[in-house]
Image (cartoon, rainbow, N blue to C red):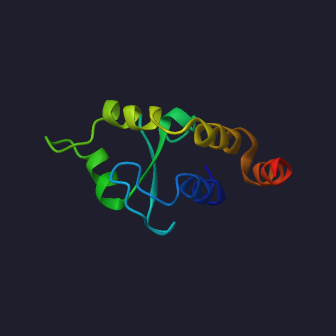
Amino acid sequence: MDSYEKALMKILVEMKCEWCRKKYSTDVLHVHHINGKRDDNRESNLVVLCPTHHALAHNKDQKRITPDRLRTRVKNRAEWRKKMIRQLIKNGFTKFIDLASKEK
């Protein structure tokens, strides 16, 4: 994902960490690949996290946020949000903006 796509994904989750639901600016939030593969940009593999929870997702000790727990959180996203994120990933930033403006 390029920086525009990451920023737009953060906006689609209302600029909130998907773990703690606190609101942050786009430059603070991180897009995390749940399975650790940076080239796997499926909607089901991406989650937006604040720096604290992003670190816990990479942590190897007891306090770690496991991939299974993150997958559960992603599964519970609203359907409209999942659709928009999938369109973003499939079409890229520019084409996504064009499609979104036509849906209004």
With respect to residue 34, does 48 lie above or below?
Answer: below
Who is closer to the viewer here, 82 or 34? 82
| Towards the viewer: 73 or 44 | 73
Residue visible at 65% across and 59% down in the picture: 4
Q: Position of residue 33 (x, y in %)?
A: 45, 42
Who is closer to the viewer here, 72 or 4? 72
Percent x, y for residue 30? 45, 57
Residue at (46% x, 32% y) in the render: 75
Q: Residue at x 53, y 57 (%)?
A: 14
Q: Is residue 93 above or below residue 60?
A: below
Which quadrant of the figure has residue 83? top right
The residue shown at (34%, 52%) is: 54
Answer with left or right where residue 89 lies relative to residue 45. Answer: right
Residue 26: horizontal and vertical position, in percent?
A: 51, 66
Residue 81 relative to residue 94: left or right: left
How many tags in the picture? 0
Res. 53 in view = yes
Q: Position of residue 64 (x, y in %)?
A: 22, 43
Residue 64 falls left or right of residue 3: left
Q: Nearer the viewer, residue 61 or 103?
A: 103
Residue 40 appears in view = no
Q: Residue furthest left?
A: 62
